[in-house]
Image: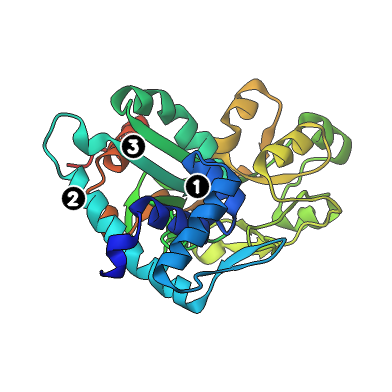
Amino acid sequence: MHPVDRVDFADLRLFLTIVRRRSFKMAAFELGLTASAASHAMRRLEARLDAKLLNRTSRAVSPTDLGLELARKIGDGFDAIGSALEALEAPGAGRFGDLRINVFADAAHLLIAPALPEFARQCPDVRLTVVVDDRPIEIAAEGYDAGIRYGHHVPEDMVAVALTGPQRWVIAAAPCYLDANGRPASPADLSRHTGLQLLLGDNSLYRWELGENESAERVRVPGLITINDTATTIAAARAGLGLAYLLEARIAEELASGQLEIVLPEHASPGDAFHIYYDSRRHGHPALRTLVNIIRSENGLTRLG
């Protein structure tokens, strides 16, 4: 009997999920199983294949070399099966299934949250998982159908679709901070102010970019508070703790209400548009295409065909 005849495909799906999540508990939760059931299924799979697929410790689980190779090969097979099912022309069949996307926090706030009600209406049978994560990742290797990042962060081997027009980065502060410390008249004045430091997803500090083209410059504004979350940075700026370097669209409400105001507006810096990106094999995922079109429409861009 061929080994595949003895293997439960549910066990293979569980195995792929464990490799992706690096956790029995998280994989079991995702698939609606108990951790003990997941552990038993993996022991059964390894026994049937007569091969060790996973290294287990009390703190972590990781694939063996053989397990990693198996995950890569059967992952392609599951993608092919998913694509075949999505291509069915039965009413609604192409939209049924799972859609997992990885987005950074500003995109979740500005793009995903506003799109969710319409997406739920158009794709009522789709199980959508949105993971908010600012660190650089390989979406295919970590089991995502798509990711959202700024255009310059999209890997070259991925299909990328713009979701917005170009963005604008500005320095902002609360009126109480500016009344107490003065309003900078030029970038040189920033060295005498307090800046809320921006920590990137790769744990590096971001040097603020001012202006564009030949006049562009990168500056370091002194400050003792470092934050890697936009919402917390906005709250700190509203409290008058310093100048903040922020995406203008992200603070539209604070600017409209007067809680924050833009400093040195003539030195605002243009930024890349938000892009969604995915492996070319996911191009035909109907729910992904629906989500893209909802976001593009809400941001004044034409729908994809």
Q: Which of 90 and 10 is in front in this view?
A: 10
Residue at horizontal 44%, vertical 73%?
50
Name the side, left or right, on which 100 lies relative to 285.
right
Labels 3 and 1: the sequence-earlier one: 1
Q: Which amino acid does label 2 sit on?
A: Ala
Q: Can residue 118 be spotted in the picture?
A: yes
Task: Name above or below for residue 168 compared with residue 209.
Answer: above
**Crowding at label 2, few (<14), some or many (≥20) Cα neighbours within 10 Å?**
few
**Mark 3 lies on residue:** 291
Name the side, left or right, on which 220 lies relative to 201.
right
Indicate the secondary structure of the residue bearing disc 1. strand
Residue 36 x, y percent position in the rendering? 59, 48
Q: Can residue 104 be spotted in the picture?
A: no
**Crowding at label 3, few (<14), some or many (≥20) Cα neighbours within 10 Å?**
many
Residue at horizontal 32%, vertical 61%?
6
In which quadrant is the C terminus drawn?
top left
Select label 2 or label 3 by which is in front.
2
Residue 104 x, y percent position in the rendering? 54, 48
Numbered badge on residue 103: 1
Task: Name above or below for residue 80 compared with residue 290.
Answer: below
Q: Which amino acid does label 1 sit on?
A: Val
Give me the C-alpha separation between circle 1 and circle 2: 27 Å
Residue at horizontal 63%, vertical 58%?
201
Residue at horizontal 46%, vertical 40%?
129
